[in-house]
Image (cartoon, rainbow, N blue to C red):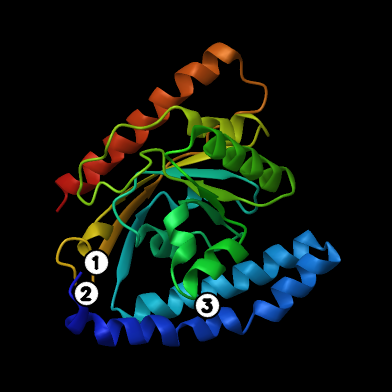
Amino acid sequence: MKILPNIPNFAKLIYELRWLEGCKKDIEAAKASGDREAEREHILKATTLWSNSLMKKFGCHIEIEGEENIPEHGPVVIMSNHQSNCDILAMLAVFQKFQIGFVAKDSLSKIPLYGEWIRRIRSVFIERDDPRASLEAINRGVEYINEGYSLVIFPEGTRSQCSTPNPFLKGPVKLATKPGVPIIPVSLDGTYKMFEETGIIKPTTFKMIIHKPIETAGISRKEEKELSAAIEKIIVDGVNKLHGED
């Protein structure tokens, strides 16, 4: 990371917290009262205001294919390739019909100011080097989904920082198959160019394909075993298509 050139960008990131902080009391009040629907609405308002403003501040744009495949409501599990930490921004800028949280690596919880917000939007932090803790995190995610919250998970488990996806892990599909909710596969390209490519945040055009939802309710064990590979192929083929258009 290049510190000095990024100082103005860090200032923008801190300034844009105003959109999130403005909704904090409403989110916490709804959570305390057990009004999950209201909590989801306030989370959606916060993340929509934040992502739209940040995209504009940084001069970023998204070219979307398959936007009609976004359901009107959750809960769903969104599965995408993972190029960059900026994938979170891209997802929040596109999925604005219902609340989404993230299955995120534990280190993101330690980011000053923003770590708290990643948790507040009903994300789940996962310790990849601790299998038992990882299983507990997935089970917590299933609980959130059963309560009506939607989650994004990146089956690669780590950022590729390029247009070539890493191999997918098989376990993440259980996040959807256990509660029996639809999976929305997403192919994403170009987010690594916003920061990881140069170490300096810069204006970028992201490309995204939102594939048709895959129903998981009532699938057999055999179908579940085949599901990971099928989703990986859909997503990777989509990334190759997007990258080939560059």
Within 10 Å of the Cα at label 1, are there few (<14), some (14-19), or many (20+) other Cα atoms? many
Residue contact at pointers 1 and 2, CB within 8 angstroms: yes
Q: Which mark is residue 194?
A: 1
Residue 197 on image: x %, y %: 16, 61
Residue 192 on image: x %, y %: 24, 58
**Kind of residue at badge 1:** Met
Question: In this figure, which residue is indicated by the disc labeled 3?
Answer: 49
Residue 245 on image: x %, y %: 16, 50
**Kind of residue at badge 3:** Leu
Q: Which mark is residue 202?
A: 2
**Kind of residue at badge 2:** Lys
Is any atom of residue 92 visible in this view?
A: no
85 relative to 28, above or below: above
240 relative to 42, above or below: above
Residue contact at pointers 3 and 2, CB within 8 angstroms: no
Q: Please give the name of the residue rendered at 45% of the width and 72% of the height, measured from the top-left corner.
A: 51
230, 131: nearer the viewer: 131
Q: CA distance from mark 3 to mark 1?
A: 20 Å
Q: Residue furthest right?
A: 33
219, 146: nearer the viewer: 146
Residue 18 on image: x %, y %: 52, 86
Between marks 3 and 2 in the image, the one whose residue lies nearer the viewer: 2
Label 3 vs 2, first from the N-terminus: 3
User: Is 105 left, or right, of 24 in this rendering?
Assistant: left
140, 88: nearer the viewer: 140
